[in-house]
Image (cartoon, rainbow, N blue to C red):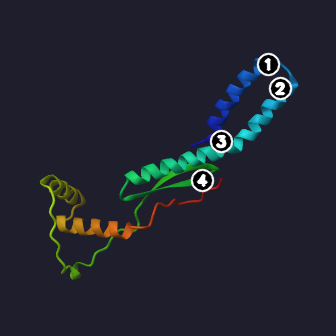
Amino acid sequence: MDARVVMTEIEESLSAQLSLAGDDPQIVEAGEAIMAGLEPAIDRAVMHLAEQAASEIDAQLPNQRVGVELREGAPVLVVHGNEDTVRIDTDDLEARITLRLSEKLKGVLEDAAGEAGESVNTFVVKTLAGKAKERGTGRRYSGTIET
């Protein structure tokens, strides 16, 4: 997300408007001052948009973490695998629970478990453990965000 693209479009638009005023040096100077004042605000707006995009994408990727990193001064969205993979102790699976669910949901769980290469029981236990671990952690960004 490069703010320079936005700045170039604004500069071109402002230059076109200023050209209507003729070659008045005061108007040209005022236009340059306006552009100089807008640049930091546009940089902050681009960063804000990157943060919003990361938050929206992060909410849609359950096993990924999306963050904003600055690279050469420009915000970049970065997707990280969830390093906090849930590990379950298979020696201590004594507790039982009965679930009532629709046939459709049961099918969805069976398909998801098959795609993960796990039994339905292991898939459900890992999913529940992961959700319980996430609880209350909120959203986070990796990298450094400067405004």
Of all residues, the one furthest to the right in this rendering is 25
Q: Amino acid at mark 2?
A: Ile
- Whole-angstrom CA distance, mark 4 to mark 1, is 39 Å
Residue occupying the point 44% across, 49% down = 56
Is tag 2's residue or tag 1's residue first in the polypeptide sequence? 1
Query: Which label belongs to residue 42?
Result: 3
- The amino acid type of the residue labelled 4 equals Leu
**In the image, residue 76 above or below residue 37:** below
Q: Which residue corresponds to mark 2?
A: 27
- The answer to whether residue 121 is left or right of residue 78 is left
143 or 104: nearer the viewer: 104
Q: Going from the N terminus, do you reach mark 3 or mark 1 first?
A: 1
Q: Is residue 141 above or below residue 8?
A: below
Question: Where does label 4 land, which residue?
Answer: 70
Find disc 1 in the rendering and name its residue: 21
The residue shown at (84%, 19%) is: 23
Whichever of callouts 4 and 1 sits on the residue coming sooner in the sequence is 1
